[in-house]
Image: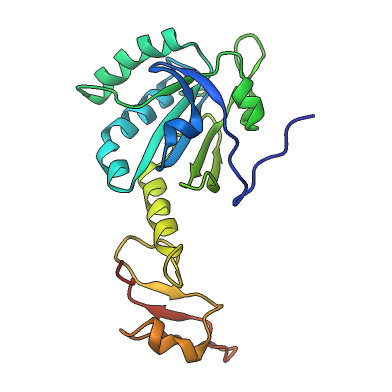
Amino acid sequence: MSPKALNIGDPFPNFEAQTNLGKIDFYDWMADSWAILFSHPADFTPVCTTELARVAQLIPEFQKRGIKPIALSCDTAESHNAWIEDIKSYGKLASFDYPIIADDKRELAVKLNMLDKDELNAAGIPLTCRAVFVIDDKKKLRLSILYPATTGRNFDEILRVVDSLKLTQTKSVATPADWQPGGQCMVLPTVQAADVPQLFPNGVETIQVPSGKSYLRITAQPQN
Ligand code: BEZ
């Protein structure tokens, strides 16, 4: 029986793993940061190479947000180190500064429910899908996305979600479709009308709708 999938809000399990940068205890490696763990089917594969290079290019953006990236691929640390030279060359990177977990035995892929039964390697063994887990500084799962092996991820979108998560955990707003940092936000449905002036001193616009209900309340993005 496969392990139960993690839900948003679940404690993210700790684990020890070998990486290209040595052995880690995941919680110790995270320390007080957030983390993004993203998995790959295998080393020396084209889409994965573009993804790992993109994340390396985005390191300053992850640092700005206090979030540490860590990848996982179902090959050995030695294989990862050889592959990293290709990733650096493809991404025109002077260095490659985040770890790739060596999950050649697929232990973590099974534990974290990341195997894609439709995507098999040459030996008929399931590959990992492109899972994304965002874990907060309390070690809680805050976002999980699964992509098939044939679709590369959009890391600008993942950074956008991290910005939304960080904004909405402290302010009484949610972010609408296609929101970008600095854009207008929606007042949370749980906010009572009487509390609006104090919570949103810059004002709230209520959009009129046929139902007559006042739930579409728009406000400027609250400042931190
Ligand atoms: C890739 O990274 O290009 C890839 C890996 C496994 C299946 C399909 C694509």
Is 4 on the left-hand or right-hand side of 165? Answer: right
Q: Residue at x 51, y 40 (%)?
A: 133
The answer to whether residue 61 is seen in the rendering is: yes
In this orientation, which residue lies closer to the viewer: 171 or 137? 137
Q: Nearer the viewer, residue 206 or 144?
A: 144
Quadrant, the C terminus: bottom left
Q: Residue at x 53, y 82 (%)?
A: 215
Regarding residue 151, the answer to whether it shows in the image is no
How many numbered marks have been drawn onto this rendered protein structure? 0
Q: Residue at x 41, y 21 (%)?
A: 46
The quarter of the displayed image where residue 221 is located: bottom left
Give residue 185's position: percent from left, percent from top: 40, 71
Residue 31: image location, x then y, percent: 42, 37
- Front residue of this view, candidates 138 and 94: 138
Residue 214 percent across, percent down from the top left: 53, 88
Q: Is residue 44 left or right of residue 214?
A: left
- Quarter of the image containing the N terminus? top right
